[in-house]
């Protein structure tokens, strides 16, 4: 009965979204949520109409992690969902993968909403590791497919020893911003201009990037390369907000140049230390992030873009 309902649901989903894919991967799929990505896992379970596996997890007195699957996943394809930030969540994901393999799961698809260590994608000095590669190779040990959202650099996918794909939450962020009366979208630098361009097409507004101009040895001015911010509603879009320092400086400059409202949006909201306070004190009118890292600013859901790439890429299992 359950399988027939799943098949019917997916036929309807396929017809309405115009996606073509093999259904057999999903009718035997279970979703397993890591502690850092419960919201994304629950959303994926709802989108695909498949069960969310009951698990038990805890920390021992010495802070070692314990994990157990409470349901039989033998022969079932599993979708493991876990962000690898901070460090303890990497260990949690590795144990989740090992538990699935020990339980004789079918295909193991690993969804990493935010891939921690993504900014350490090369050696910046002698004697250093390539940290992103080290994490990717360990995750690959018990994975058949990996999906991640807005990686800092696309070449990170090559570090995995199994097929790995990315998706972007820019569309979902732009749809949210579309309701905010945005006049134009800014990238924090020229390298991120494609993200701003994509968002601007959805919002139907102009786009630009912030250009740095050095005034003297200690003063740097930030302003849009081509557009005038005076009396405009502006959204700055980036992939990651970490300490918030650069973003706060950008907000101050735009406000000084007469911007009416300045919103900041990102896929991955780390908000390290006093990042929130920096942004607010700089005059930010709204902070927006997705739920790849769950926080108080997670106003946009990442599961939709993840589900879209899953529908396309799971055909490799057939």
Image (cartoon, helix red, strand yellow):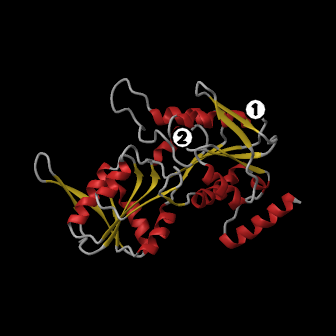
Q: In the image, 200: left or right of 69? A: left
Residue at the image point whose x is 69% and y is 33% from the top: 98
Q: In the image, 96: left or right of 171? A: right
Q: Secondary structure at mark 2?
A: loop
Q: Position of residue 8 (x, y in %)?
A: 81, 66
Q: Position of residue 245 (x, y in %)?
A: 30, 49
Q: Which residue is mark 2?
A: 84
Residue 167 found in image quarter: bottom right
Q: Residue furthest right?
A: 1
Q: Secondary structure at mark 1?
A: helix
Q: Position of residue 228 (x, y in %)?
A: 23, 72
Can residue 274 be seen here? The reply is yes
Vertical side of 114 occupied by 94: above or below: above
Q: Which residue is mark 1?
A: 102
Task: Nearest to the eye among marks 2 and 1: give it.
Answer: 2
Q: Position of residue 227 (x, y in %)?
A: 25, 70
Q: Nearer the viewer, residue 262 or 106?
A: 262
Report, in whole angstroms, how far the alpha carbon at label 2 lies from the one at label 1: 21 Å
Q: In the image, 29: left or right of 287? A: right
Residue 288 found in image quarter: bottom left
Q: Quadrant of the N terminus?
A: bottom right
């Amino acid at each position: 009965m359950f399988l027939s309902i799943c098949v019917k649901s997916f036929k309807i989903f396929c017809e309405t979204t115009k996606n073509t894919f093999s259904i057999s991967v999903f009718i035997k799929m279970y979703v397993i949520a890591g502690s850092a990505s419960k919201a994304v896992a629950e959303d994926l379970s709802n989108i695909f109409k498949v069960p969310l596996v009951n698990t038990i997890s805890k920390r021992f007195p010495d802070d070692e992690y314990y994990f157990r699957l409470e349901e039989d996943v033998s022969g079932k394809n599993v979708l493991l969902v876990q962000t690898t930030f901070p460090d303890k969540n990497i260990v949690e994901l590795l144990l989740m993968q090992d538990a699935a393999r020990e339980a004789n799961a079918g295909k193991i698809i690993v969804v990493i909403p935010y891939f921690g260590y993504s900014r350490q994608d090369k050696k910046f000095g002698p004697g250093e590791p390539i940290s992103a590669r080290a994490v990717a190779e360990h995750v690959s040990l018990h994975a058949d497919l990996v999906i991640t959202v807005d990686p800092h650099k696309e070449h990170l996918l090559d570090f995995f020893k199994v097929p790995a794909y990315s998706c972007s939450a820019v569309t979902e962020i732009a749809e949210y911003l579309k309701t905010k009366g945005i006049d134009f979208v800014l990238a924090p630098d020229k390298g991120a201009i494609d993200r701003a361009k994509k968002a601007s097409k959805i919002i139907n507004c102009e786009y630009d990037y912030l250009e740095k101009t050095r005034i003297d040895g200690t003063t740097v001015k930030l302003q849009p390369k081509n557009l005038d911010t005076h009396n405009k509603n502006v959204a700055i879009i980036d992939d990651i907000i970490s300490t918030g320092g650069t973003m706060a400086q950008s907000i101050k400059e735009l406000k000084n140049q007469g911007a009416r409202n300045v919103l900041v949006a990102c896929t991955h909201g780390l908000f390290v230390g006093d990042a929130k306070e920096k942004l607010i004190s700089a005059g930010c009118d709204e902070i927006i992030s997705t739920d790849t890292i769950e926080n108080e600013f997670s106003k946009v859901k990442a599961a939709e873009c993840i589900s879209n790439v899953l529908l396309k890429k799971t055909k490799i299992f057939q």
